[in-house]
Image: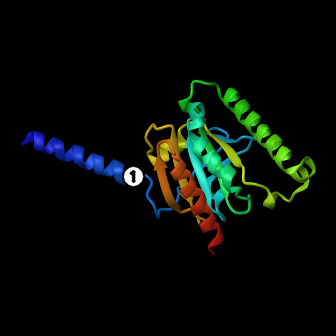
Amino acid sequence: MKSFGILQVIFFALVGSISAQPAQGEPFPQLVLDRENGGKLGGGGWQCSDVKGKPCLLVLIHPDHQELLDPVEQALANTRLSARECSLVKVMDTQSSWKPDGMIQAGAWLSQIAGKVSEARESGLIQALFTDRKNKPAHWSVVYDQNLVFRSALRLNDRPVHVFLLDKRGVIVSYHAGNPSDTNARVWIQMMKQLGASS
């Protein structure tokens, strides 16, 4: 009889932990990363409300496993979404890495510089410098979570990648925990285009 009671407790604990995880159709929590908890690559705080107004692909990623986003990067390169169609946010879960925050940030800076050089090479230097920002390809905004704000608030497991697709209102359209596949990436990009086109 006692063991049955223990099993009931375990069952309800499991149900509670499952239901607490992100669900399709729910608004994404209004999380804030201030100076104590991280923030933007260029400095200053960041909040989830910053991404409202257009579809957003928001990724929480372990800084040491960014290669797991290669399928997403390839799908983005093939589709060439513009900055006015969508926003891309990469949240670096720095506490999960052995690297110091400064080293992680330096790597992100180098990655962004490489992206600008690649854009200039493909589009021409003058066009890359003077094209209206809204007509430029979408690029990742890099944000740092230094105190497990995202994992704690959303009760996420320790997988290195968590992908959220949000609509213009900040509602979760799709959630994926684990390594993205080529198919996942293509579907997310297509969904962003459709969400951006819808009123």
Type of amino acid under label 1: Ala
Q: Name the image quarter holding residue 1.
A: top left
Q: Nearer the viewer, residue 34 or 115?
A: 115
Please provide percent x and percent y for residue 40: 70, 43
Q: Can you say whether 93 is above or below 129 in the image?
A: above
Q: Mark 1 — residue? A: 20
Q: Mark 1, residues whose alpha carbon is within 10 Å: few (<14), some, or many (≥20)? A: few
Q: Is residue 177 left or right of residue 5?
A: right
| Viewer can see residue 141 | yes
Please provide percent x and percent y for residue 80: 71, 55
Please provide percent x and percent y for residue 107: 71, 31
Image quarter (top left, top right, bottom left or bottom right) of the C terminus: bottom right
Question: Which residue lies most toward the bottom here?
Answer: 199
Q: Nearer the viewer, residue 142 or 46?
A: 142
| Viewer can see residue 30 | no
Q: Is residue 129 left or right of residue 81?
A: right
Residue lying at 79% horizontally and 56% vertically, measured from the top left: 136
Please provide percent x and percent y for residue 118: 80, 42
Q: How is the image coloured?
A: rainbow
Q: Secondary structure at mark 1?
A: helix
Q: Is residue 183 left or right of residue 80?
A: left
Circle count: 1
Residue lying at 57% horizontally and 62% vertically, measured from the top left: 191
Residue lying at 73% horizontally and 59% vertically, measured from the top left: 82
Q: Name the image quarter holding residue 158.
A: top left
Q: Can you say whether 103 is above or below 170 in the image?
A: above
Question: Which residue lies most toward the right here?
Answer: 126
Q: Nearer the viewer, residue 24 or 119?
A: 119
Residue lying at 60% horizontally and 57% vertically, measured from the top left: 189
Q: Can you say whether 64 is above or below 71 in the image?
A: above
